[in-house]
Image: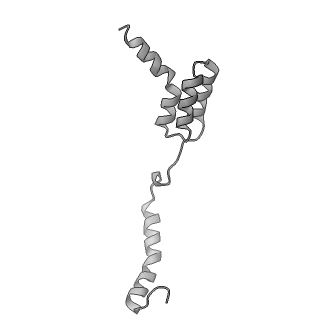
Amino acid sequence: MVELVPLGLSLFYLIPFMAAAARNHDATVPILLVNLLLGWTVVAWFGLLAVALLTPAQSHPAARRRTSEEIGHRSRKAMPRILHETFSGEVAGE
């Protein structure tokens, strides 16, 4: 049981980094570095925790799912042009 105390303290010490990593934060690596170097100061630890939890996390464009209406709308707009090029024998750009 006593052997688990250092592990528990280490995990507690890295909570700001773990929160940033879980949120896919833009500044995950800088948060880890500052946490390792200055996390022992209580002010820096709480500051890092605030940055990790309160600032916006990274958003990937691929993470946003398009609705079926958006997909259908785009394909319906492109379809007449594709059909015209296919059946008229014209090549785009000529």
Relative vertical location of residue 21 with respect to residue 36 in this rendering, above or below: below
Which residue is nearer to you in this view: 68 or 86? Answer: 86
The image quadrant of residue 5 is top left
Q: Position of residue 21 (x, y in %)?
A: 48, 35
Q: Position of residue 66 (x, y in %)?
A: 45, 59
Which residue is nearer to you in this view: 20 or 72? Answer: 20
Q: Position of residue 23 (x, y in %)?
A: 49, 38
- Drawn side of residue 84 relative to residue 44, left or right: left
Q: Kindly give the residue lying farthest to the right in the view shown.
A: 43
Q: How many marks?
A: 0
Q: Residue at x 56, y 26 (%)?
A: 35
Q: Position of residue 57 (x, y in %)?
A: 54, 41
How is the structure coloured here?
A: one colour
Relative vertical location of residue 35 with respect to residue 9 in this rendering, above or below: below
Relative vertical location of residue 8 with respect to residue 82 in this rendering, above or below: above
Relative vertical location of residue 3 with respect to residue 68 in this rendering, above or below: above
Q: Kindly give the residue lying farthest to the top in the view shown.
A: 2
Q: Residue at x 48, y 30 (%)?
A: 18
Q: Kindly give the residue lying farthest to the left in the view shown.
A: 1
Q: Residue at x 46, y 16 (%)?
A: 9
In what quadrant of the picture does the N terminus appear?
Answer: top left
